[in-house]
Amino acid sequence: MNDAQGYLLAANVVVWVGVGAYLALLAVKNRRIENRIRQMEMIRRDRDQ
């Protein structure tokens, strides 16, 4: 493997790690939004009773 291939492989790894981290961040944010929606629905149900 020459230097160019090594750099290309390293860049590829960095990109995929970044994509994975971004997807993990989106999953955490999505979970927080879902929890907040559930809280709001419970408040609404309590208020309507």
Image (spheres, rainbow, N blue to C red):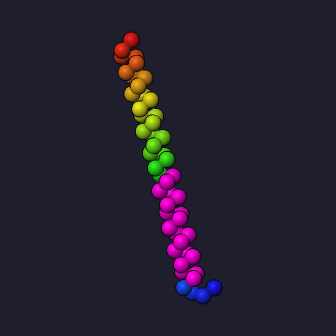
Residue nearest the viewer, comparing 2 with 43: 2
Residue at 39% in and 22% down: 43
* Residue 32 relative to residue 4: left or right: left
How far from the left and from the top, in percent, is residue 25?
47, 51
How far from the left and from the top, in percent, is residue 15?
50, 67
Residue nearest the viewer, comparing 32 with 1: 1
Magenta stretch: includes residue 12? yes
Magenta stretch: includes residue 28? no
Toward the bottom, the furthest residue is 2
Residue at 42% in and 34% down: 36
- Relative height, residue 41 to residue 20 (above, below): above
- Relative height, residue 4 to residue 41 (above, below): below
Residue at 45% in and 40% down: 32
- The quarter in which the C terminus is drawn is top left
- The quarter in which the N terminus is drawn is bottom right
Residue at 44% in and 29% down: 38
Toward the top, the furthest residue is 49
- Relative height, residue 17 to residue 28 (above, below): below
Q: Quadrant of residue 33?
A: top left
Q: Quadrant of residue 4?
A: bottom right
How far from the left and from the top, in percent, is residue 37?
41, 32
Which residues are the magenta region?
Answer: 5-24
Toward the right, the furthest residue is 1
Magenta span dominant secondary structure: helix
Numbered disc total: 0
